[in-house]
Image (spheres, rainbow, N blue to C red):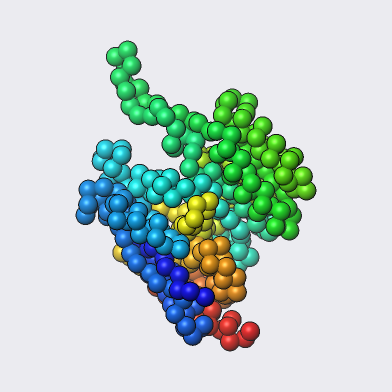
């Protein structure tokens, strides 16, 4: 296998801390394999990029992303940059990167780890066995629609955002969702919209239904309104397998799903669709704990595992990562966000990363 080039955007806040552990995972894969597999190069993105270059994403960073085989991203944003003009805020760099790279499908697994059942705010009987995959449309909808901005209309300051979805945009993300559903054990898809109020959702429901009937008749499809979906995720989350939804709804629902499973620090994601995939934890930059060495690196580590699987076809190596996380949690190791007083062993960011690397070596030694 040729050496894979990885563009690294550590970003802001705890991004650089969790990224350090992700890169340690890649080094461990190379050590186990006995060969050089990866070449990494870092560029700036987000607030740190604005501080250095006065833009949240540089042309140089975008060129590196385009020339790479995959992208690893830590986190962007923070209150330090909240007063910047909207187009210069850290998040605009991330949104611009997604749009420029045509990453239209965000894949977010929400799986409860057996050792973390007690970390969920919901009862064990509700969350046990949760294994949900949310496909969030990532390149359209309210975050990108035009017109947008703050205007004076008839002398009144007015903020405008526009929800826009075209048939091709909905078709392509629906195909991704149906394909993932077809490959899973339960093999069913739920489409989430607000078609009782929004015309864009009326089209969404129509197009998703047509794609299912014409191209994936073997995959059971159901529809649910987003407000009911938010309730059902708390009431009976095990009813869901794969979900597909719009940019805004997916952003909100996956944060809800992350807390049901125990901590937002546990959930990875993959942004797919273009020629280069991007992998990032769904948590934010958490500036309140930056530099304290207590951030949970497992979502970043699991995102790295997703990169191995989806971008590089390294299925065995991805399994090493995933099984190692399972093992470390089963042995009782916890970062602060998933620690319950008197239960388990509290560890910091770097120690958790080292534990996962050691578990990978142990798993390989038993194969």
Name the residue rendered at 29%, 52% in the picture. 58
Residue at x 47% of width, y 34% of height? 142
Indicate whether 108 appears above or below 197: below
- Left or right relative to 204: residue 337: left
What is the quadrant of residue 109 in the picture?
bottom right
In the image, residue 366 sits, relative to residue 256, either above or below, namely: below
| Relative depth, front residue between 86 and 326 | 86
Residue 265 visible in the displayed image: no
Residue 303: give x, y in percent of width and height. Answer: 50, 62
- Image height of 253 relative to 67, above or below: above
Q: Residue at x 30, y 19 (%)?
A: 152
* Residue 364 seen from this side: yes
Compare residues 235 and 304 and report the one nearer the observer.
304
Q: Residue at x 57, y 37 (%)?
A: 168
Q: x, y percentage for residue 335?
A: 46, 67
The residue lying furthest to the right in this view is 218
């Amino acid at each position: 296998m040729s050496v894979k080039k990885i563009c690294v955007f550590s970003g802001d806040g705890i991004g650089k801390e969790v990224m350090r552990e992700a890169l340690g995972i890649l080094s461990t894969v190379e050590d186990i394999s006995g060969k050089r597999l990866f070449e990494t190069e870092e560029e700036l993105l987000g607030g740190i990029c604005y501080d250095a270059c006065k833009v949240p994403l540089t042309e140089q960073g975008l060129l590196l992303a385009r020339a790479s085989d995959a992208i690893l991203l830590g986190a962007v944003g923070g209150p330090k940059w909240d007063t910047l003009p909207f187009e210069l805020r850290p998040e605009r760099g991330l949104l611009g990167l997604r749009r420029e790279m045509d990453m239209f499908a965000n894949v977010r697994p929400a799986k409860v780890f057996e050792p973390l059942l007690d970390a969920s705010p919901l009862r064990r009987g509700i969350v046990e066995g949760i294994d949900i995959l949310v496909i969030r449309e990532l390149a359209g909808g309210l975050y990108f629609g035009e017109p947008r901005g703050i205007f004076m209309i008839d002398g009144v300051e007015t903020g405008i955002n526009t929800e826009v979805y075209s048939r091709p945009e909905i078709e392509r993300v629906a195909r991704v969702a149906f394909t993932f559903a077809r490959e899973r054990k339960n093999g069913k898809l739920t489409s989430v919209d607000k078609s009782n109020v929004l015309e864009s959702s009326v089209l969404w429901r129509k197009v998703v239904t047509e794609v299912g009937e014409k191209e994936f008749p073997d995959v059971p499809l159901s529809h649910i309104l987003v407000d009911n979906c938010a309730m059902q995720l708390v009431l009976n989350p095990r009813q869901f397998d794969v979900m597909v939804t719009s940019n805004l709804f997916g952003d909100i629902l996956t944060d809800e799903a992350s807390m049901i499973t125990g901590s937002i620090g546990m959930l990875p994601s993959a942004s797919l669709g273009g020629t280069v995939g991007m992998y990032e934890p769904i948590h934010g930059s958490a500036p309140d704990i930056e530099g304290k060495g207590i951030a949970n690196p497992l979502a970043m580590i699991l995102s790295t595992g997703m990169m191995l699987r989806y971008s590089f076809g390294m299925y065995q190596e991805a399994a090493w990562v995933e099984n190692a996380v399972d093992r470390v949690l089963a042995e009782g190791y916890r970062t602060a966000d998933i620690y319950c007083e008197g239960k388990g062993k509290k560890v910091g960011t770097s120690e958790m990363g080292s534990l996962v690397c050691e578990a990978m070596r142990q798993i390989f030694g038993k194969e």
